[in-house]
Each structure stands twice: as C-alpha cells, then as structure tokens.
Amino acid sequence: MDVSDRESAETVGAVARKLCLSIRTLHHWDQLGIASPSGRTLGGYREYLPADVARLRRVQLLRDLGVPLRKIPALLNATAADRRLEMKLRQEELKAKIRHLQSVEATVARMLKADEVGVLLSAAEQQDAFGASWDPAWGPSAREQWGDSAQWAEYAERSALRTADDWQRAVAPMQEVTDAFALAKRGGVIPGSDAANVLAEDHRAAMGEYFHCTLSMQVLMARRYVAEAGFTEYYDQFEPGLAEWMKLVIDAHARAKGIEPDTAAWE
C-alpha cells in the first residue's frame, strides 16, 4: 500500500459523512461486492483508501442517475460504448419521468384552479355546455357555501380533468331528467307516485356526474332550487313552477325512504 494512501485512509463513518451516505448503505454495497474498503488499520479494522472513495463516488453518481445496483459492477469497468449506451437509456427514462411530472404538475394546477372556480371553461363554453341561461357565477357561489366539503373537493377533482366535450356529456343526463320533470309536471304526475319517485332517483343519479349524492344531500340541493332566484329562474324556464314541483317530488321520495326533508343534513 502506498504510504500516502495509508495516511489518507478513512473509516466507514468518516466516508459516510463525507459522501452523505448512511453506514448501512456502505455496508450493503460492500456485501454486494460493489464497493468495498481495501485498507486495514493496525488493529485490523477495515478502511477506505482514496481509490475506494473514488469508486464510491462513481457508484453514488450512477445510483443518483437511477442505474440499478445489479448493473453497476459491470458498468464501472465497461467500455466507453457500453457506458454511453447505459447513459442514453437513463436519459430516455429521465425524459419520460419529466414528461410524467410535467403532466402531474399541470393536473395539480388545474385542480387548484377548479377548487377556486369549479368549472374550468370560459363563460361561452359553459353556456354551450349548460345552456344559455347558465350563470358562470354559480360555480364560485357554490364554492363559498360548500368549499370545505368533501363533495366540493370531488366536484373540483372531476372538473379539473374535464374538457368542454366532457362537460357536455356529463350534463346531458341532468338535462334529460330536467326535461322529464317538466313533461311529468305537465302530465299531472303526483309527487310520491311511482313515476315521480323514478324521476327523483334519475335526478340523484344525474347529480352523481358531479359528486356522490345521498338522499339527504339531494333534498338540500332541491331546497336551493326554490330558495335561490337563479336556480328558480333556470328551472322555471322549462315549465312554470318546475323548481317548486321538483322539490316536492324529491322531498316526497326522500320521505318514503326514511329521510325527513325538514331535518335533512349534508353528509
């Protein structure tokens, strides 16, 4: 052993601190035969010589690049062509990871925005999807009331992933059930009847395009149809008095299922 090497030898603990690695990691690499201390103290303890530390740095770099441990021993002694091939593989893997992370970051950004405003469409796109009478202010208004609820979170998460076409497909069931409510009211269907109860269930299923909706939550949503002028005007355009009639139908259905509308709670 070169005298200068002997004087520069370092313990496992000292090398671990220098390279910001754990002693356990160094022992593991030693056991695998990837990088081992080749020096000995006078007392017989193993030490890392400068060449050992240099090898450890190469191992550490390759691990940081994502090279599997099983490939590292051969790669440390590989030809330039083989090293370049492995680095190109790592480069392509990193590019794929970067693309994935960029996609994830974009989704997170959309989720943050959706949590603020609800629907991530322009006012014109919202009216194309929801109808000319749709008020884009309803989204932020709903957030003020329900923003801390799990349902708003679910709604925002779905919204973040939806395009204008997705929204048109999502709202189609609600439009269909609204038209069916209007037709049933004109036809004299009685709240609490089998036909009316089917409509109530269809309405709750349509709500499921936005968030999981229980009977109690459906009752509270219907309450807004008559309590808030914007909702009343929206539904009454399909049939005069439709908002109130929808509430009667939904309340009667909930009552038949054991839910008292007057004491319904958001779940």
Image (cartoon, rainbow, N blue to C red):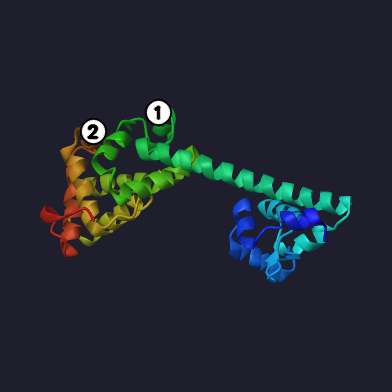
* Circle 2 Cα neighbour tier, 10 Å, few/some/many (<14 / 14–19 / ≥20): some
Q: Which mark is residue 82?
A: none
Q: Amino acid at mark 1?
A: Ala
Q: Which residue is rendered at x = 73% and y = 50% of the image?
A: 90
Q: Quadrant of residue 40?
A: bottom right
Above or below, 98 relative to 203: above
Q: Residue at position x 65%, y 67% from top? A: 28
Regarding mark 1 in the picture, which secondary structure is present there? helix
Residue 163 at what x, y percent from top left? 49, 40
Is residue 121 visible from the viewing direction of this image? yes
Q: Residue at x 20, y 49 (%)?
A: 220
Q: Where does the C terminus fall, quadrant-wise?
A: bottom left
Residue on which disc 1 sits: 123
Residue shown at 36%/36% (left/top)? 116
Q: Which residue is mark 2?
A: 230
Q: Nearer the viewer, residue 30 or 242?
A: 30
Mark toward the start of the polypeptide (2 vs 1):
1
Asked where in the image residue 257 lies, by quadrant, the reply is bottom left
Amino acid type of the residue tagged 2 in the rendering = Gly
For residue 246, say whether it is visible.
Answer: no
**Position of residue 229 in the picture relative to residue 175 (left or right):** left
- Across and down, in percent, residue 97 comes to 63, 48
Nearer-the-camera pick, 17 or 69: 17
Measured along the vertical axis of the image, is residue 113 above or below residue 170? above
- In front of the other: 257 or 114: 114
Question: Label 2 to label 1, Cα distance in Å?
Answer: 16 Å
Q: Quadrant of residue 77?
A: bottom right
